[in-house]
Image (tube, rainbow, N blue to C red):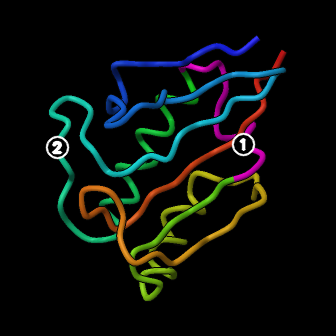
Amino acid sequence: MLKKINTEKAPKAIGPYSQAITSNGLLFLSGQIPLVPESGEMLGGNITEQTEQVIRNISEVLKAGGSGFEHVIKTTCFLQNMNDFAEFNKVYEKYFTGKPARSCIGVSALPKGALVEIEVVAEIPL
């Protein structure tokens, strides 16, 4: 059975989708960009600051879905500029310490002009 996950501690979806969906013990998070949950506004700044905000958002959705960073199986990361790869990794590795499988893709643009977007698949521990 599919269950929608939504929390006020992460940004509201800006389109026709849920923050996350659970299915068969797995949690599928929609991509998070650096929106500030309280205002819905984009966090300005550089790749480091934006990645920190994205990861704060992911943390809240993981918690709402009954999971955490230690249960992440796979991430897909989108960078607006691949020259930001090294700085992005410095932030990423602080949180995804279990080294889940990952894809990192350079894209020409992201919603609202974001520099980074990350989506996650995690297990929900029993």
**Placement of 87 over or under 17, stated as above or below:** below
* Disc 1 residue crowd, few under 14, some 14–19, many 20+, Cα 10 Å: many
In the image: residue 84, left or right of residue 27: left
Q: Amino acid at mark 2?
A: Glu
- Which residue has dot 1 on it? 72
Nearer to us of marks 2 and 1 is: 2
Residue 88, position as x, y percentages in the image: 47, 71
Residue 113, position as x, y percentages in the image: 25, 64
Q: Quadrant of the C terminus?
A: top right
Q: Verify whether residue 62 appears in magenta.
A: no
Q: Looking at the image, which residue is at 16% across and 43% down? A: 41
Dividing the picture into quarters, in which one does residue 10 lie? top left
Secondary structure type for disc 2 = loop
> In terms of sequence position, does the residue under pointer 2 or pointer 1 come before the other?
2
Residue 84, position as x, y percentages in the image: 42, 81
Which region is colored magenta? Answer: 64-74
Q: Looking at the image, which residue is at 65% across and 18% down? A: 66
Residue 124, position as x, y percentages in the image: 76, 24
Are dots 2 and 1 in contact, CB under 8 Å? no
- Distance between mark 2 and mark 1 Cα atoms: 27 Å
Secondary structure type for disc 1 = strand
Q: Looking at the image, which residue is at 54% across and 18% down? A: 5
- Which residue has dot 2 on it? 41
In the image: residue 108, left or right of residue 5: left
Q: Residue furthest front?
A: 16
Q: Amino acid at mark 1?
A: Val
Dividing the picture into quarters, in which one does residue 92 lie? bottom right
